[in-house]
Image: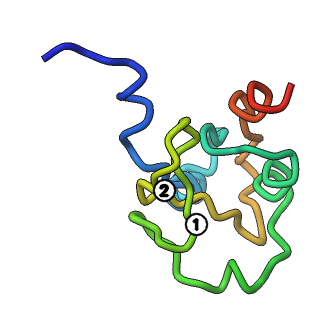
Amino acid sequence: KEFNARKNRSIPPLNYPRVYDLCYKFPNIDFWINGGIRTLYHAKQICYGNTNKEIIEQRHSVPCTLCSQNNGSSSTQNNGSCTVALSEVPCNLRGCMMGRAAIDNP
């Protein structure tokens, strides 16, 4: 089979809860979230905490039917990504990368 980098980037679902779990499991390691961030508002929620308690209290997992994200690709199909931001951010979550947001909104 031929490797297709574009297809490879769009297949795996994003899993922010796994990143948060890793932050708590390895408190001496710094982490950044990359993927699925389309707005400055979402980036701020990820880095500073989500104040929308209604969203936080819902059960998020992967595959996630609540987030309705498409993994940041140009596809409009939901692939089960979970991109919920926590209300309290782990101190070793240092930031997020907004490459797609910058490309989509120059």
Name the residue located 70 percent from the left edge and 44 percent from the top edge: 37
Q: Report which quarter residue 86 is drawn in.
A: bottom right
Label 1 sits on residue = 67
Estimate the x, y position of residue 38 in percent, counting from the top left.
73, 44
Q: Are marks 1 and 2 in contact (CB under 8 Å)?
A: yes
Label 2 sits on residue = 81
Q: Bin the neighbour count of mark 2 within 10 Å (Cα to Cα): few under 14, some 14-19, many 20 and up.
A: many
30 in relation to 91, above or below = above
Name the residue located 71 percent from the left edge and 47 percent from the top edge: 93
Residue in front for this viewpoint, 76 or 2? 76
In terms of secondary structure, where does tag 2 sit? loop
3 in relation to 58, above or below = above
Estimate the x, y position of residue 16 in percent, counting from the top left.
56, 55
Q: Report which quarter residue 40 is drawn in.
A: top right
Q: Report which quarter residue 80 is drawn in.
A: bottom left
Q: Residue furthest left?
A: 1
Give the amino acid type for the residue marked by disc 1 in the picture. Cys
Give the amino acid type for the residue marked by disc 2 in the picture. Ser
Q: How many marks?
A: 2
In terms of secondary structure, where does tag 1 sit? loop
Left or right of 11 on screen, residue 61: right
What separation in Å lies between label 1 and label 2 (alpha carbons)?
7 Å
Estimate the x, y position of residue 68 in percent, counting from the top left.
55, 63
Left or right of 31 on screen, residue 68: left
Q: Earlier in the sequence, mark 1 or mark 2?
A: 1
